[in-house]
Image (cartoon, rainbow, N blue to C red):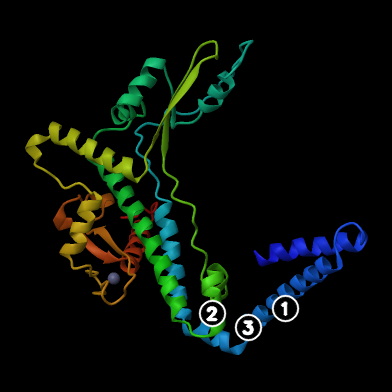
Amino acid sequence: MLRTALGFLVVAIILDAGHPDLFLSIKGRAVLYLATISIVAWEIYTFWYFHNEQFLKLKSGIKDHATDCNNLNHHIEELKRTQLDINSYDYGLSDRYDTSRYQFKRSKWAKAKRDEKVHNCSASVCKAANDQPFKYLCKYFDIDVNEETLSHLESALNNYLAAYQGKILLEQERDRLMQTLTGPLPSLFYKLNKSRLAKELGFEPVRLVDIHFQTYRFQYVSSGGNSSYEVSIVLDMENLEKFIKYLGDMLRFKNSAKGQRALMTPQLREKIKNRDGNTCQQCGISARDEPNLLIEVDHIIPISKGGTTTEDNLQALCWRCNRTKGATLYQATNSVYEPV
Ligand SMILES: [Zn+2]
């Protein structure tokens, strides 16, 4: 922000130098020069401060913590990239050309035809999809109502929830570390420009862009192209949870003899974490030892290996152990990494 202000001030000085009579009075000019000099002096001072021995010592004192925070940041990015591949068929590719004389909005329709997450349909299907999104999602996007789909959705929701919680905990931990630093300049920077202080201390920026949730669309364009509308179903965390409950009910209805299986919901995650005392079942570290520790809920036998979402197949793991487990599984199977 200061640098932007400096930019404006420099432009003002150049303009003023070119046309001394037009813009400023002597007083105004004095203020302009004083402000510019102050900002330049402040920039030089902070540059010197962030490169002097005292600050470098502070920085090296929290180096391991900063690295740990950056690793958690990478882990969160991996969780955010979880793919929702729940469609059962791939119908292949073809080319389509709209050769009609009047195109109107049909050019949009032709473009969207290639997208497997868009279904072109009649106005009545659009309306019905708006009334009962999940039912029509399964029907028109070839999503099988079975255990596999349910497990896939649960795994994705579990990862998204962990990413969401992890981001909050990471920011809290970074703030906590920065507050432990003593010295007038770090405290001043903490108040005025946290992100600059974080950057100088070696913290990678926490990306504020949220998770890219899968969106399915039903769209209708009339044959003349004059009337059209679209129904979007965004599988964000709230909708995913509802979709899981919907599929769970459908499956229970179908396989009522099979008995009830737990559904991975935010409530179940909390239940497992409390049952395990918010303690990692592998390394024993707990939220009491580390105030901003991200505890995740892990399938002991991974879903990809036939594990199910039952309470005895779930455990609390710290993010470090869960990340190591994911990496080990990846090496073992040498297939596409599916976070578990
Ligand atoms: Zn652990």
Amino acid of disc 2: Pro
User: Which residue does the image show at 47% across and 82% down from the upper left?
Assistant: 181
Query: Could one spot residue 95 in this view of the protein?
Result: no
Q: Residues within 10 Å of mark 1 (few under 14, many from 20)?
A: few
Tag 1, which secondary structure?
helix
Disc number at residue 49? 3
Q: Is residue 35 left or right of residue 93?
A: right
Q: Quadrant of residue 20?
A: bottom right
User: Which residue does the image show at 8% across and 41% down from the upper left?
Assistant: 259
- Look at the picture and state if 268 lies above or below 279: above
- Look at the picture and state if 161 lies above or below 185: above
Amino acid of disc 3: Tyr
Q: Quadrant of residue 314?
A: bottom left
Q: CA distance from mark 2 to mark 1?
A: 18 Å
| Residue ID for mark 1 | 41
Q: Residues within 10 Å of mark 3 (few under 14, many from 20)?
A: some
In the rendered view of the protein, which quadrant contains the N terminus?
Answer: bottom right
Residue 283 in picture, x, y percent from top left = 26, 74
Residue furthest to the left: 257
| Residue ID for mark 2 | 186
